[in-house]
Amino acid sequence: MVDVTGHLGMALVFAAPAWLIWGRRVALAFVAFTLGTAMLPDVDLVLQQYLPITHHGVTHSLLFVLLVSILVGVVAAKWLTAWLNDHRWIRSTEITAETVFVFATGGLILGGVSHLFADILSAPDIAPPIKPFWPIYPEPIIVDVIYYDSPLWNFGLLAVAVGLHLVLARRERYPLETRYRIGTRTDPDERQYSATSEE
């Protein structure tokens, strides 16, 4: 496993496509949300105080990440859509429940999968290897190229990821026109998207 810095760097790499789907404000919110979920699989460190589970066990599987992501996405779509549309500080066009679901589920999946990917690349030096495809394939998968206390990997990955986001954030145009795009009333490019998408 990498340290927290490395996990955040990997989450930034996985969240980079947000700049191609949403405008700057929403992409920034998505990236922040993905960063906040990057440590999701390590919830086992808290749960093991109450449940008979081990670190790098079931919470470090794609099954766990997908189930939690979909559950949170459904709850967010049901309970947050009206709230997001009522709050004027967001200054957006109408946000659909489908968009809220994609935003929440996508952020959780990317954060969780980025964590699993970083752990696969990591040497099992202070924790056992993970079994990301459990229960379908219950064997551990290890690539063993990163060590937990390697500042070069951890801070290097974070620096490269931040650089990638700075480059993408400066883009003037967004190539993807998707139905999940949230247009804001303050950005002319996004207002234009909203107007054309309603036609």
Image: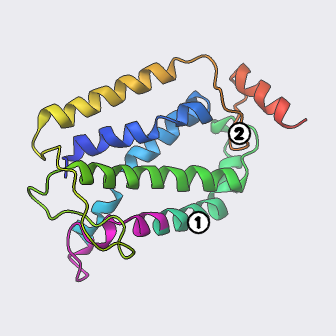
The quarter holding residue 41 reads bottom left
**Amino acid under disc 2:** Thr
- Residue type indicated by callout 1: Val
Q: Identify the magenta region.
A: 47-66
What's the distance in space between the residues labelled 1 and 2, CA to CA?
23 Å
Q: Secondary structure at mark 2?
A: loop
Q: Position of residue 49 (x, y in %)?
A: 20, 76
Residue 108 x %, y %:
46, 55
In the image, is residue 70 part of the stretch drawn in magenta? no
Q: Is residue 111 visible?
A: yes
Q: Which residue bears the numbered disc 2?
A: 178
Query: For the residue carrying disc 1, how many other residues have a C-alpha within 10 Å: few (<14), some (14-19), or many (20+)?
Result: some
Q: 92 and 164: which one is in front?
A: 164
- Residue at 24% of width from left, 48% of height from top? 121
Residue pictured at 24% horizontal, 41% vertical: 6
For residue 75, which numbered disc appears in the image? 1
Residue 37 visible in the snapshot: no
Res 133 label: none
Q: Is residue 74 left or right of residue 158?
A: right
